[in-house]
Image (cartoon, grey):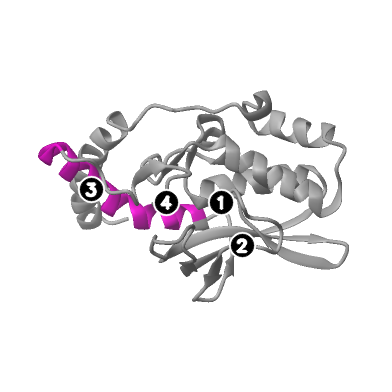
Amino acid sequence: MNSKCAWWLAPVAGLAAAAFTPVVLRAPKPAMNLPRDVRDLHEALEDCLESRLDGWELVDFATRLVNEKFTRYSVWHLWENSGLAFKNSRGFSEQYNLGLARVLSGLGYDVQAVHARHVHFDPERPGTESWRNGHTWLRVSYRGETLDVCASRAGHRAGKVSFMPLSDPRPVHFWTGGLIRLGLAGPVTYEVWKSWLSGRPVPRWVFRGFHDRG
């Protein structure tokens, strides 16, 4: 890296850190839930093994468990990985579904996480609007059959999800989460600062109850 590049990168990095630090400090504390006394992904795996289910029934059991564990939908806590997000009961699709992927992989399933930049979600109940945004979910294979799996809604079952990708789903790689977070960091920082200065709540796309989609 030449000296000119280093000269402008340092202040830019400093400004970014100064802007994002209050976002971290003002982030809501965990509102943890302990379904079946499950605290972390290790205990989730043990709980699934103790269920004595198998096949797609076991996939659905694990999916419901992850859905019940989360109490907050959040793109505010971007620094948390899937394990910490699961423990703290908060996160967005990349966090909760990768947590589910770790459980299902531990149970012996062939799991591929995928991400689409544009996904259309059906209304959860009459009178509410549909919406579209980026989304990460799983494609799980069992005995030659591959089905979509997602823990975003309580009613989801393997192969029965309430969304449709509008752009090509692409496999999730180790760098995918970083790119997603980089894309979200700027808008989230802006909304948190805006909320702080105005005294108004952050938008629902930033932080809300996990099961609240009204």
In terms of sequence position, does the residue under pointer 4 or pointer 3 come before the other? Answer: 3
Amino acid type assigned to the residue bearing label 2 in the image: Val
The residue that label 2 is drawn on is 161
Q: Residues at badges 1 and 2 in contact (C-beta under 8 Å)?
A: yes
- The residues tagged by marks 4 and 3 sit, at their Cα atoms, a distance apart of 19 Å
Q: Residues at badges 4 and 3 in contact (C-beta under 8 Å)?
A: no
Point 58% across, 60% down: residue: 172
Picture disc at residue 213? 4
Residue extending farthest front? 126
Is residue 189 part of the magenta span, yes or no? yes
In terms of sequence position, does the residue under pointer 1 or pointer 2 come before the other? Answer: 1
The residue that label 1 is drawn on is 153
Element under label 2? loop
Amino acid type assigned to the residue bearing label 1 in the image: Arg
Give the magenta range: 177-199
- The residues tagged by marks 1 and 2 sit, at their Cα atoms, a distance apart of 8 Å
The nearer-to-camera label among 3 and 1 is: 1
Amino acid type assigned to the residue bearing label 4 in the image: Arg
Q: Is the residue 79 above or below the residue 31 in the image?
A: below
In the picture, measured across the screen, residue 98 lies left or right of residue 209, that is: right
Place of residue 106 in the rendered image (x, y in percent of width and height, measured from the top left)? 77, 42
Point 62% across, 26% down: residue: 39
Element under label 1? loop
The nearer-to-camera label among 4 and 3 is: 4
